[in-house]
Image (tube, rainbow, N blue to C red):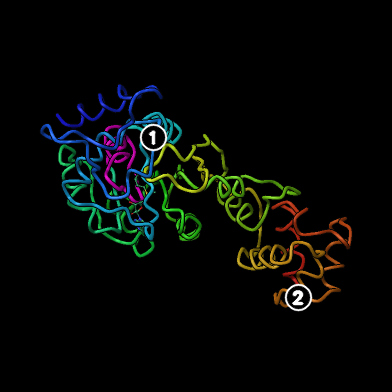
Amino acid sequence: CSSMKMREICVDSTLDNTQQPSLFFKAKGTDRRPLLVGLHTWSFDRFNQIENMLPYAQKYNFNFQKKFGQNFLIDSHVLDKIIAAAGVTKDDVVLEIGPGFGTMTQYLAEAAREVIAVEIDKTLIPILQETLADYDNVTLINEDILKVDIGALVEEKNDGRPIKVVANLPYYITTPIIMGLFESHVPLENITVMVQKEVASRMQAGPGTKDYGALSLAVQFYAEPYIVANVPPNCFIPRPNVGSAVIRLTRWDNPPIQVKDEKFMFSLIRASFNQRRKTLQNSLVNGGVGVTKEQIVDALEQMGLSATIRGEALTLEQFAKLSNIIGKHL
Ligand code: SAM
């Protein structure tokens, strides 16, 4: 069975760095030749999944597309770590965003009850149909994830019970994907994803740090973030220009704070961080959220905070309180 073959290759093929991590192969006694145009510019000190990918890339004449954020994961240790961090079991329905060649999809198919894989790039579909042919628990959808009605899928595949989301995300749409999942209130248990390292740090950051901002608060309102691992560029093909990290976002069972008007609170948060060097009162007065300086000063006083405090010093709980106090006057 090819799934078994795939597993064997994954765990056994770590080359030591002195071996030739070749992107070339010797076909029928001919000279070494590149499998893909441009691949010779990449070198690898990890060789796991690439062995599996290159024959497919060649067979289907596949070209990596930068516009789709295609940096495929080639390190089986990282794949194992992602699956373990997500806690995928045979009870789970998993949504994978951007299966690429189906490498992670195979791991997920073996660990989960069912996998729904949504891939935008139609040139990957025939490859996926081949690499996933042995799995009868994978549903492949050729669509832009931002256009998929995920709530309806969860209803259909898991009777509306929470699913898990696992992905090596296309970095160009990390925030819309994650915030879309949270804001649309899709039933989900956790999201375990590879993202740009800097974005992972922003999601996990707390008040008073340089990474703390609207994204930290938005994510932490819905979930508890945990950075599982940092992943260097040489774990991908082609190598991204940035470092990456796996982050798990575990959805809160109950909201961590009580806020009367979520939308208004997030408009305050956005306005505060749009001008993060200014005091909170100046950012909010200039931020077009419809509040007066007096209302803000009064609210800060009620909260026992300095009138010159900056937004970056406030916790999620304090933003909620501020929003509840100011909201009363509007
Ligand atoms: N999962 C594969 C892996 O780890 O090797 C590929 C990950 S690659 C970083 C991102 C994948 O997302 C690519 O396959 C890309 O074509 C796909 N993708 C990009 N934008 C997408 C979108 N809007 N909807 C669905 N898939 C998308």
Left or right of 258? Residue 190 is left
| Residue in the image at 16% along x and 46% along y | 59
Left or right of 193? Residue 51 is left
Mark carried by residue 44: 1
Q: Is residue 43 above or below residue 220?
A: above
What is the C-alpha distance between the residues marked 1 and 2? 50 Å
Q: In this orientation, which residue lies closer to the viewer: 53 or 260?
A: 53
Question: Residue 45 location in percent, x, y?
Answer: 40, 30
Residue reaching furthest to the left: 28
User: Mark 2 Cα within 10 Å, few/some/many (few <14, many 20+)?
Assistant: some
- The amino acid pointed to by label 2 is Asn
Instruction: Determine whether the residue tagged by mark 1 lies in a helix, strand or loop.
Output: loop
Magenta region includes residue 315: no
| Residue in the image at 72% along x and 78% along y | 290
Residue reaching furthest to the front: 31
The answer as to whether callout 2 falls within 8 Å of ligand 1 is: no
Whether pointer 1 and pointer 2 mark residues with C-beta atoms closer than 8 Å, the reply is: no
Q: Residue 155 occupies which quadrant of the picture?
A: bottom left
| Residue in the image at 33% along x and 52% along y | 154
- The amino acid pointed to by label 1 is Phe
Looking at the image, tell me whether mark 1 or mark 2 is earlier in sequence order.
Answer: 1
Query: Dividing the image into 4 quarters, which one contains the N terminus?
Result: top left
User: Mark 1 Cα within 10 Å, few/some/many (few <14, many 20+)?
Assistant: many
Q: Is residue 291 above or below residue 69?
A: below
Q: Which residues are magenta?
A: 90-114
Mark carried by residue 286: 2
